[in-house]
Amino acid sequence: MNEQQNSVKKFAVGDVLVSDQFKKCENVPYIFRTHKVDENFGVVYYKHKGREDTIGYSYVRKANFLERIFGWMIN
């Protein structure tokens, strides 16, 4: 296994994720919960305003404890 394979992000259904890069966008939520993960394409699925959408692994990170607790109030 090479170094790049070791650094691949792993996400699971139900993870709370944060998209810092798209914080100001209206079409992409700042914090959301995944409901489906596609490891082959490196995307996670989420629902926003009643529509399902995807976002790539490179644009999201797992929310820390405070973001999981208070992030929903901000959004």
Image (cartoon, rainbow, N blue to C red):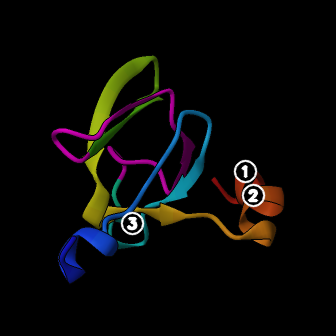
Depth check, mark 1 against mark 2: the one in front is 2
The one of 58 and 71 positioned closer to us in this rendering: 58
Query: Do tag 1 and tag 2 residues touch (Cβ < 8 Å)?
Result: no
* Residue 39 at x, y percent in the picture: 28, 41
| Labels 3 and 1: the sequence-earlier one | 3
Q: Amino acid at mark 1?
A: Trp
Magenta highlight: main SS:
loop
| Labels 3 and 2: the sequence-earlier one | 3
| Residue, disc 2 | 68
User: Which label was assigned to residue 72?
Assistant: 1
Residue drawn at x 63%, y 53% is 75
Q: Could you give the CA–CA distance between mark 1 and mark 2, rounded to whole angstroms?
A: 7 Å
Query: Do tag 3 and tag 2 residues touch (Cβ < 8 Å)?
Result: no
| Residue 32 is covered by the magenta coloring | yes
Q: Could you give the CA–CA distance between mark 3 and mark 2, rounded to whole angstroms?
A: 19 Å
User: Residue 49, relative to residue 10: is it above or below?
Assistant: above
The one of 53 and 23 positioned closer to us in this rendering: 53
Say few, some or many: other residues with alpha carbon within 10 Å of mark 1 (under 14 / 14 to 19 / 20 or more).
few
Q: Amino acid at mark 3?
A: Lys
Q: Secondary structure at mark 1?
A: helix
| Residue 38 is covered by the magenta coloring | yes
The residue stretch that appears in magenta: 26-42
Depth check, mark 3 against mark 1: the one in front is 1
Q: Secondary structure at mark 2?
A: helix
